[in-house]
Amino acid sequence: MRVTLKVWRQRSRTAPGKFVDYPVENVNPDMSMLECLDVLNEELVERGEEPVAFEHDCREGICGSCGFMINGVAHGPQRATTVCQLTMRHFKDGETLTLEPWRARAFPLIKDLVVDRRSFDRIIASGGYVSVSTGSAPDGNAILVPKETADRAMDAAACIGCGACVAACPNASAALFTGAKIAHLGILPQGKPEQDRRAIRMVAQMNAEGFGGCTNIGECTGVCPKEIPLEVIAAMNHDYLRGSWRARDNVVTTIRPFTEWSTGSKLKTDLSSD
Amino acid sequence: MGEVAMELDAKIPSGPIQDKWDKARFDMKLVNPANKRRHTLIVVGSGLAGASAAATLGELGYHVKCFCFQDSPRRAHSIAAQGGINAAKNYQNDGDSIYRLFYDTVKGGDFRAREANVYRLAQISVEIIDQCVAQGVPFAREYGGTLTNRSFGGAQVSRTFYARGQTGQQLLLGAYQALERQVHAGTVEMYPRTEMLDLIVIGGKARGIVTRNLVTGEINTYLGDAVILGTGGYGNVFFLSTNAKGSNATACWRAHKRGALFANPCFTQIHPTCIPVSGDYQSKLTLMSESLRNDGRIWVPLKKGDKRPAGQIHEAERDYYLERRYPSFGNLVPRDVASRNAKYVCDEGRGVGETGLGVYLDFADAIRRLGRKAIEERYGNLFDMYQRITDEDPYNVPMRIYPAIHYTMGGLWVDYNLMSTIPGLFVIGEANFSDHGANRLGASALMQGLSDGYFIVPYTVGSYLATSKPGQIDASDPEIRNAVACVEQTIQKLLSINGRRTVDSFHRQLGKIVWDYCGMSRTAEGLETAIDQIRALREEYWQNVKVAGSADDLNQSLEKANRVADFFELAELMCIDARERNESCGGHFREEYQTEEGEAQRDDENYSYAAAWAYRGYGNYPELFKEPLDFEYVLPSQRSYK
Amino acid sequence: MATTVIGTREIRPVRFWDSTNGQKAVMAVSGVILLLFVFFHMLGNLQIFEGPEQLNYYGAALRRFPEALWAVRAILLIAVVLHIWSSVKLAVRKTSARPAGYARRKNVNSSYASRTMYWSGPILLAFIIFHLLHLTTGTVHPGGRFIEGDVYHNMVSGFQVWYVSAWYIFSMILLGLHLRHGAWSLFQSLGMNHPRHTPILKKAAMVFAIVVVAGYISIPVSILAGWVK
Ligand SMILES: Cc1cc2nc3c(=O)[nH]c(=O)nc-3n(C[C@H](O)[C@H](O)[C@H](O)COP(=O)(O)OP(=O)(O)OC[C@H]3O[C@@H](n4cnc5c(N)ncnc54)[C@H](O)[C@@H]3O)c2cc1C
Ligand code: HEM
Ligand code: HEM
Ligand code: SF4
Ligand code: F3S
Ligand code: FES
């Protein structure tokens, strides 16, 4: 089969971007979307043009590197599937596919289909963990966890941090991602002690990053490759409200969001270690 | 190039094996807490090994800088691990023990691992589970609330802990969150999208790294008192593997060129149950969990080139070759044996699928016996994944599977303290020549990565700092300039060649060579051929490769070009090592050395050693150093699965 | 310091009102008040089918305790103000959160109502203002005189004007949309997170919305149809 890829090309955040049409011949229906881009890129390189930059690593739907909009849907038409696992047989012969990067202020573009998702790391850094240092753990069976609880925690923990929820949300809200971590740790006994604090801090960071507010629209779960349930957002609201009510610590540290990548070295090689 | 320690001292503590680790820890010098902050440590890699090490060192108060090439530490290749992680908890009361895990691992590794390390690994396995549970890793549970286990990779005891089919993901997220906690505390600086391209060795000690910022292309140097590599395995030498596309050997290889010995490069693991290649566009192979072999029956048609659909081939015309050849273990023989036999039947022209490179994994009997429901419960998600990729329904037509390269036991040589032959350069996780000998048992790599990172390297690095007292270095040291220059030259060269072939086309061809001659089974002359072909191809590479784009922004084809350049040299060393080792053991099968039943034939007389190779300059033959392996506790025996 | 590491930390008190989640809670609570009012107000109005005496008695009853009346009015006013305040806050965030929009966009998992809250809301506000002038103060009362206190007469005369009824009916439908999402969403916003409840709440919200819309619309319709004179 053949398809036309209508790809967003943009050299850098500051450079202007535009769509470019690339017809791709002899596409094999068993190819993944990314393998189709591989084929295109091989041709481009042979022609001496710059290949399309797109993020990928595991190509098994688990690392969360890949992801872009296909015809206006994050990760494309098939539910619960990342673009690396999306095979071309889901498209019609001769179809034109519009490939666009995630668009959100908190996901500044780096190049073509690649965006900067460090805001997610900062949200986790601000409280998405259990504060237990290596060596201080009790025996694995010291705290019993009902199977049902463990399963619900696992449902939330399955998030791969791909950012599709933000991309698809009309508010560009990170509620599903943030809620998933707050729910995962909040459900488990190991995470209870920090439950309020965690929610307050992670929400504060989420807001500092400039994500939109959630109005419970629900697009996020619809495109989430791991089908993270909407309840995690309610769980986040619950923990946050209770936390604010008890006002444990109303002074939190947030991390100043930044989008710079350059290490700021004037000369191309910077010899100082700090 | 850096000079090499002439004899290999593994620094194994004296005393009975149970007490070695305690003794070692007691003998270690400690760093005064007040001084820790003054030590800058460089951790390259944020996988299970790297992230756990960086987090723990940060908790201890060191000033840590952690690097990874992905956009977030959470995306390291460890995330893809499915099956589970072993630990000698004996929660199932089925007779497991530290000693049994130790025994199984040494035997499974076909007696090519270091006993003391393996025993320590088994001891620490217990603490790992506790740590991960405390971090909130949602391991599978019994209704009573206790942790549950499964038996894995043909082990006789149930010692494998798991979180659905995403154990690696959950363990890595645990380590990643611990890491981010330290980032927030200010003890760890995280550098994503930053690739290490060279090691800085000053006064014979590892003192820093040269990196390329993958977004801006800036070449930077980072200096410190010790460098810890947790950069993963080199399975991608084969181009097609189950590894993540970005997994590479560059960090290790450039350290090797700076003087670190590379051990057992030819010990690579082939996983029997992967989805077969479907076309030449294919970019990677997908693993299907080993557990499928518990209920699936493996077969091929009796007749050559029988292209009828499976359904039309009657029982009488089928060859259940594993059950036939290994009556007692049947379809559950270890990975290396299962893989090799699949290759044989396909070489005989009895393989299935268009490519003829595949065998059937048939669940018809199991479904008849247990009912579709039961099978759905056990393997539902795997069947879905298979269907998503192949568009075939494994409930009705048998799965097609074929072996694929999966893990690399070889790696940089390290002593008992996980320090390489370059003082101050520590190597952890899959990157070191691990505790798995010539063959890794399922669910042991996660265990090793976390044990190295959480529980071993934090002690041994401290001891190194306390004893060797690395002093100040001045930033204008010629070694630094030299390393930076090397990196910049390589990049400039790659961009300037501007030939006619893409990096991937070279990589595919290289992978094919290594797969054909240094894959599931090897022969001396085959390896000779491979070495010649690899050399020739590498020559062409440096004449004819085409790398688009520039050096000063995100340029993925340049990244690949850098990595493939190193794969060429590593591939050659793998073949040299494979040819040098005139025996068959574990994943290394030399057709010349097999029992009359066609099983691996070890030669403990002459090859009971770890082969550690020293780099001797581009194109020169590497120098071999041998670390003899003696077995006091688990006496070598012939593996038999008849 | 290299900038690829996470940035410098800044200490600041998190003010509940500044957080998206806080604003959602305010919106929910104010939403509940409005929602309850709308429900009981509907019941009150339906007494029109009991005949003039009953409805006017009810209207008079409301006025018998002015303090109570004004208390209720005050609460309603505060609720509307808070509700609008929070929705405006969220709307502003929304626009800044995605500076560059998509060339193509397709929704896969959301209700029309949920995506149009920012439209249905303000139109409702416009309706309320008109409605107060129309039936509370009578300042705007096309078709017949507005008689202070004769609620029955005011309604009938008011709704006999077709375009007034049309505007009411249109607004009621928007109200229905707004409630269809809102009446479920508020539980989510207040942290009710039991997996089994969500689908039930969504259905309940739908039923509630339909009842309210039907109840209200029945009035202008039956007046236009001449069943109520
Ligand atoms: C599909 C699959 C399934 C598996 N299942 C299991 C299982 O069930 N049980 C089990 O025990 N094992 C399993 N394994 C093996 C196991 O996952 C790996 O051996 C283990 O995760 C390796 O971890 P690591 O930390 O050593 O390296 P990795 O996780 O590979 O991490 C490497 C890190 O180094 C960084 N890096 C690499 N090069 C550079 C560079 N030049 N500069 C900067 N950073 C660099 C990367 O960014 C990454 O962060 C599986 C492997 C695969 C492929
Ligand atoms: C006056 C202008 C109004 C505006 C701009 C407005 C806007 C909104 C918006 C944007 C939401 C958010 C939806 C969500 O977060 O889930 C909302 C929720 C809601 N609105 Fe309104 N609305 C208005 C009037 C009303 C009125 C008159 C009522 C009552 C009849 C009402 C009842 C509700 C309810 C119950 C909710 C749910 C609260 C929540 O989800 O947290 N709104 N409104
Ligand atoms: C067909 C629909 C409706 C009818 C027939 C109706 C009728 C009336 C009448 C007759 C009054 C005057 C009562 C009095 O002065 O004694 C009134 C007041 C009012 N109505 Fe409605 N109403 C309708 C819909 C609504 C809706 C949908 C809302 C809100 C979203 C609303 C909000 C109000 C308010 C706030 C007042 C003022 C109450 C007060 O005096 O404090 N009405 N309505
Ligand atoms: S919640 Fe789902 S969509 Fe959002 S980041 Fe996690 S996996 Fe991706
Ligand atoms: S789509 Fe957006 S509005 Fe909330 S429910 Fe999902 S984040
Ligand atoms: S590449 Fe890892 S999820 Fe798609």
Image: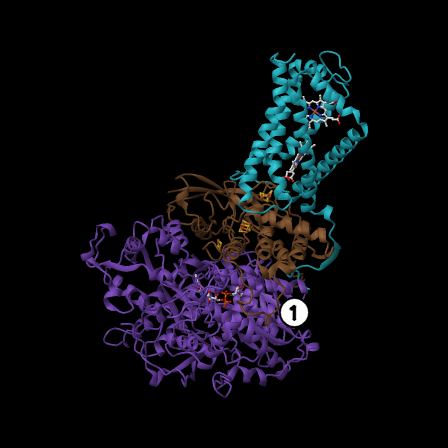
Chain colours: A brown, B purple, C cyan
Q: Nearer the viewer, residue C38 or A235?
A: C38
* Residue occupying the point 63% across, 19% down: C219
Q: In this rendering, does residue B626 appear at all?
A: yes
Splitting the image into 4 quarters, where does residue B437 fall? bottom left
**Relative to A171, residue B38 above or below:** below
Residue highlighted by disc 1: A271
* Residue occupying the point 51% across, 86% down: B13
Q: Position of residue C154 (x, y in %)?
A: 72, 16
Mark 1 residue CB less than 8 A from any atom of ligand 1: no
Q: Nearer the viewer, residue A162 or B362?
A: B362
Residue B384 horizontal side relative to residue B182, left or right:
left
**Residue flagged by tag 1: what amino acid is it?**
Leu
Q: Position of residue C221 (x, y in %)?
A: 61, 17
* Residue occupying the point 62% across, 72% down: B41
Residue B222 horizontal side relative to residue C66, left or right:
left
Splitting the image into 4 quarters, where does residue C84 fall? top right
Q: Chain of mark 1?
A: A
